[in-house]
Amino acid sequence: MDFPQFFFDLIGNRLFMAIIASIHVFINHPLAVGAYPLIVLIEWWGRRTGKVEWDRLAYRITFVLFIITTTVGALTGVGIWFTTALIAPFGIGSLLRVFFWAWFTEWLVFISEVILIMIYFLTWKRWSEGLMKKVHIGFGIFLAAFSWLTMAIIVGILGFMMDSGTWPVTRTFISGFFNPLYLPQLAFRTTYAMMTAGLCAWFMIFFFTEKGSPFRRQAVRLVAAWSFGWAVPFIPSALWYWYRVPDSMLANINVGLMTQRFMHWHHTLAVIMLATVGVISLITLIGIIRPRYITGLVLLVPFVLGIWLLGHFERVREFIRKPYVIADYMYSNGVKIEEMPVFQRDGILPYATWVKNHRVTSVNQLDAGCDVFLVTCSRCHTTSGLNSLTAKFKNLYGPEPWDKEVLNAFLRTMHVTRTYMPPFPGNDAEVEALVTYIKYLQNNREPIFDAQARWQPKPAQPVDSMSSP
Amino acid sequence: MLLTFNQIVFVLLTTIPIPRDIDLPLPFSSWGLKFFLVVLFLLHILFVNLMVGGSLLAVFFEILGLNQKKYDQLGKKITETVTVNKSLAVVLGVGPLLCINLVYTIHFYSANTLTGYAWISIIPLVIIAFLLAYLHKYTWLNWQEKNKKFHIFIGSMAAFLFLCIPLIFLTNINLMLFPDKWPEVSGFFSSLRVGNVFPRYFHFLTASLALTGLFLAGWFGRKKYPLETALPEFSHAELKKIFYKLTFYATVAQFAFGPLLLFTLPYSGISITLIIIILVGAALALLVLWYLHREIKKGNDQPGYSYAVIIFIFTLVVIAMGTGRHIYREVSLAPHRALIASESERFHAILLATRMRLAAGQGAGEALGTAITGEKIFVNCAACHAVDKILAGPSLVEIYSLYKDNPEGIVKWAKAPGKKRPQFAPMPSFAQLGDEKLQLVADYILETVRQNTTSGKAAESPQK
């Protein structure tokens, strides 16, 4: 309400964010965090055994990583800043005030990481002998360490958004950062990254080595052993995370529906997790014993499973986080818990900057309803696109004209009956206005294109109260 | 003064959006953050300049190289610097982005959301530009013979994108300075009309060429650069002359673009300090020109010691311009920030007053016994249950038939609902309301249906 509303009415803001964040994670985990240590291992092995093929393979894989991580990888990471600026400026603006130093440190680590990958890749050919080769491997180790550190910092922030621990009380940086989910999540992501990095390298081996050659067999054996080795610690760390999530989540959730849905997802998660680990262990074992049996196509199976697993985790994370951007402090629509009584008494429109109507009157019901929608629902729902209000209400109340009283009751109790949504932050007149707008949407598919341009000066009353001390 | 402060405030309130600021403390002193912002931004923009200038020059020399082979080699060598500089430009951008988000939270984010689609398109555009830049670099030799035209096209596309991206950024940085224009803006293209985007943009482009010239003069001119193997057809003196000349003419051009930029700046942020700083910068730039001229005339050696002098003075020029830019922003935004602060304070006072009134009122309400009735609590159920209509759950009439002599049963169910009817989603638990309230609502449900059936016979509706 304090920022112009960027609103993507067809896809919805949630999906928009999810796309960029997922691409980033899918690239960052296996192709950076997990891959650098593996490559350094291959390079080191090549030096030890004196076989140039290892070195050549490591170089070629690094070339692919270099291109991908310095373009799509780096930019989707930065892209998360750009997207949240549009979708939840109030949320990211607040988080930034708490976590500035964490992000600042992460930035320094990120700079080091990019400089290191440039040094590591661009000096490969020049520093190929004797001492310089050792130095080169040393840079590789630093690179691996820094890219893991970047993740270790970000995980603190992600965990905080799910469970702010004692932060709402203490408001200190440390209490927010080392929240109860920090270590389990870090262990889960680390082992996952390492494990899948082996699979990615395996996939590239098919392009970078000769078919049927003994070297290909050796290379496959090495990366398969790597992935298998990491699948073992992956199981306990995933279980740790899996057990920890409901503790901290369900503590705040007292509604059966939510719990049921959560437990259902939680269950699915266990199934996917087991399937992924099972398939990966099996494939890597075969890879170690009979490297030739595994083809590129077979490798796609754990790949898809892995993406599904991570995707589901992110989805649960997002779902659980609702209705908050910052747990127990600020809802996803930017309303803070402490502001709720004011808005429910006076309405939210008089206090919102970027709306056309600051008061609901008998003539502006529909237009004011649109404002109320934008301020209170639009961060999570569209009008008629994905995750739309019209579809949700049709699901609930069927295709006949929806009853005013019923919609009214829904809005008043939306938080109590569905804890994943915030309470309605407005007064009776605004409930009426939103009901009018929702009923209008039922019959008129009318996407909002000018969300940003809805501005009218606030009523003059602020001046009075300012001038009379 | 003709207008009192309050009158001015009133005028502003009716023409400018006055939001509230985020009410968490800054993590660091605001002066410290501003210092970081200016320094880190200059560092970032340096590499942006080298990226933009380098990609333009690479294509330029590649085209020259169609006739004279040696320029083609020069273009290739420049491309190799671009792919490194562009990565540094991106990573160094994050720091100033964090700082500007902190120090100018309202202004920067508002500009972002107002130019929404253009703002977010920066990400895919940069990705594409980078991939094209790599393609341009790594295919240079392979596409030398057959695909040369296409290769030049790839390079030009990358350079074109590198020209577009700064324009989007600049539009945001510019738009944030003029909150009074925000209501008129709808999207990127209309934001181009606010303030003086284009003079600033030309100033930036020319600076890119000047800086890239200076950088390349040093890069190719340094003693350790393997000229004999990398660029055998060039001498140190020749390269130095080419790039010093580029810097010289670009800097001369700034004496046209600079004043243009200054005179088209909206008045809101102009101050004496600003003018003085800019003039000092311009004087130093004249000194740079004099040095460059001397070096170009001297001709036949490597940049050497005087290169360091030029770099030093040039750095001072850049610092002066960067500081001037910051001072303009501060002055320009000061009135709006004061309004935001007072609006935030006003709201904070309301918050506090409400909290106190609420605390007092709760006691009073309970004393009067007006607080809780079954009817009020039923609001929790009304989204799914109505007297004789099926909403998201069974009708009250049906519930009545099940529980008419057993209100306790309703309480028990509401605390831990089961799953009976396949056509409905499960009912959420209401255990959090507590036995007492659920008892009230159970009585209310039964009573309501009883009244409806006795008065209007609604329950035994004739049709069904």
Image: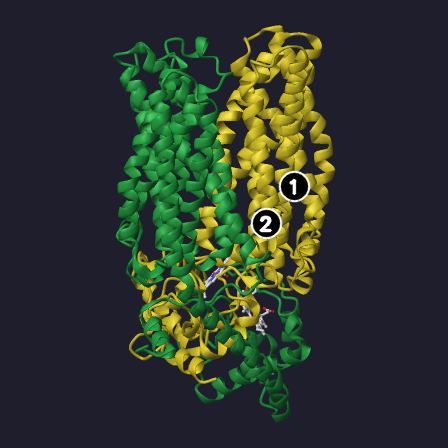
Chain colours: A yellow, B green
Task: Tell me if residue A20 can be seen.
Answer: no
Q: In this view, does A38 lie to the left or right of B455?
A: right
Badge 2 sits on which subunit? A
Picture residue at 45% right of the left edge, 23% below the top: B219
Residues at marks 1 and 2 on the same chain: yes
- The front one of B25 and A151 is B25
Residue B393, relative to residue B112: is it above or below? below
> Which percent across, then down, holds residue A193?
63, 33
> Which percent across, then down, holds residue B15?
31, 69
- The front one of A401 and A318 is A318
Residue B436, relative to residue A54: is it above or below? below
Q: Which residue matches tag 2?
A: A317
Q: Quadrant of the N terminus of chain B?
A: bottom left
Q: Hey, which quadrant is residue A130 in on the image? A: top right
**Mark drawn on residue A152:** 1
Task: Tell me if residue B422 can be seen.
Answer: yes
Which of disc 2 and disc 1 is earlier in sequence?
A: 1
Q: Residues within 10 Å of mark 2 (few under 14, many from 20)?
A: some
Name the secondary structure under disc 2.
helix
Q: Is residue B301 left or right of residue B36?
A: left
